[in-house]
């Protein structure tokens, strides 16, 4: 629930510690996000079940990771534990060298705000705000931009996502693909170092799904973000630098492709720039 501008200010504070988007992305080999022995259960007594069983993995900058597996295998639970949304029963998550789950509430909140962007199937857009306002609020309350500058930048980003003629509409009047592009635009204006997306394409048609994956891929490649995407559609595997497969709360070993595949460019692909970055096919 939104309570006050102060709340919004905390929600969308600017990631000041994140490197300038103008700087070239220099990738080192050490992982930016590490999970060690993550275990998470739900319920108690006879109904207790383990959604995660001793999961360890290391994720790197500049990579798009696809997390796949059957329904109920623990994908969303793993994503939530990695992204500081759900506390594991045991195990450790280390982000940029910091133990995430030993942070106090204020540190944790700051970590989420500074470093993480979340994209969920349900879009999580504010129903009362237009597409433009969804972004403006991030820029005004998060980055502290003035109204005029926030509007200019929000219009620019939405325009480049092909939403110029939709930006004054509220979510109820937008299609699924349009809503998802607004949610992505809102996630990207933060310039996060970690992007967590839980089934971002499942409500979209193939064309819109590809657009979303193109954008997420470019975020990894051009901004050096670590992108973790939960997906079911095997056609999306071509976007992955790494495929992580789960079954019954555990990782399935040797799931990565021998060599990362690049998606074939689509016909009529155009390239656009968002802020300082060029994105494909919007
Ligand atoms: N809040 C919860 N309370 C009780 N059980 C839960 C809760 N969240 C998840 N679970 C259980 O944990 C297991 C893993 O759930 P999770 O949502 O992580 O699976 P998933 O791989 O994301 O599945 P899907 O592909 O259907 O989204 C499931 O058996 C689920 O019922
Ligand atoms: Mg899920």
Image: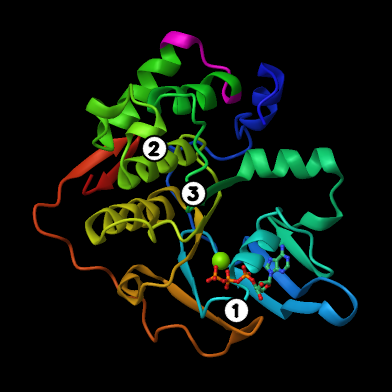
Q: Distance between the residues labelled 2 and 3?
A: 12 Å
Asked if disc 1 and disc 3 are in contact, CB closer than 8 Å, the reply is no
Q: How far apart are marks 1 and 3 (CA)?
A: 20 Å
Label 2, secondary structure: give it: helix
65 magenta-colored: no
144 magenta-colored: yes
Q: Give the range drawn in magenta.
A: 142-148
Query: Which of these two is toward me, 182 or 48?
Result: 48
Q: Where is residue 48 in the image (x, y as percent from the top left)?
A: 82, 77
**On the rendered structure, is 237 left or right of 92?**
left
**Residue at image mark 1:** 73
Label 3, secondary structure: give it: loop
Residue at point 30% right, 74% down? Answer: 235
Query: Ligand 2 falls in which quarter?
Result: bottom right
Query: Quadrant of the rendered structure where residue 43 is?
Result: bottom right
**Residue at image mark 3:** 122
**In the figure, 102 relative to 252: above or below?**
above
Q: Can residue 275 be seen in this view?
A: no
Disc 1 beta carbon < 8 A from ligand 1?
yes
Query: Which of these two is toward me, 87 or 3?
Result: 3
**Residue at image mark 2:** 182
């Amino acid at each position: 629930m939104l309570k006050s501008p102060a709340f919004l200010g905390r929600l969308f504070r600017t990631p000041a510690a994140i490197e300038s988007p103008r700087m070239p992305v220099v990738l080192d080999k050490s992982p930016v996000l590490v999970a060690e022995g993550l275990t998470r259960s739900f319920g108690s007594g006879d109904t207790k079940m383990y959604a995660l069983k001793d999961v360890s993995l290391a994720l790197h900058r500049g990579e798009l990771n696809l997390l796949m597996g059957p329904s109920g295998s623990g994908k969303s639970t793993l994503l939530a534990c990695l992204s500081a949304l759900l506390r594991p029963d045991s195990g450790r998550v280390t982000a940029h060298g910091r133990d995430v789950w030993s942070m106090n509430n204020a540190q944790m909140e700051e970590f989420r705000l500074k470093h993480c962007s979340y994209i969920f199937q349900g879009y999580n857009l504010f129903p009362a705000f237009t597409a433009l306002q969804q972004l403006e609020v991030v820029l005004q309350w998060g980055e502290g931009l003035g109204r005029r500058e926030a509007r200019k930048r929000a219009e620019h980003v939405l325009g480049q996502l092909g939403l110029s003629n939709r930006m004054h509409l509220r979510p109820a009047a937008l299609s699924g693909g349009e809503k998802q592009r607004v949610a992505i635009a809102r996630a990207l204006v933060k310039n996060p170092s970690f992007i967590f997306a839980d089934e971002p394409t499942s409500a979209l048609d193939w064309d819109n799904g590809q657009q979303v994956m193109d954008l997420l891929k470019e975020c990894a490649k051009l901004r050096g973000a670590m992108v973790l995407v939960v997906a079911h559609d095997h056609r999306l595997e071509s976007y992955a630098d790494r495929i992580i497969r789960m079954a019954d709360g555990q990782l399935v070993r040797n799931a990565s492709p021998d060599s990362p595949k690049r998606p074939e460019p689509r016909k009529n692909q155009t390239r656009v720039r968002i802020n300082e970055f060029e994105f494909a096919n919007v």
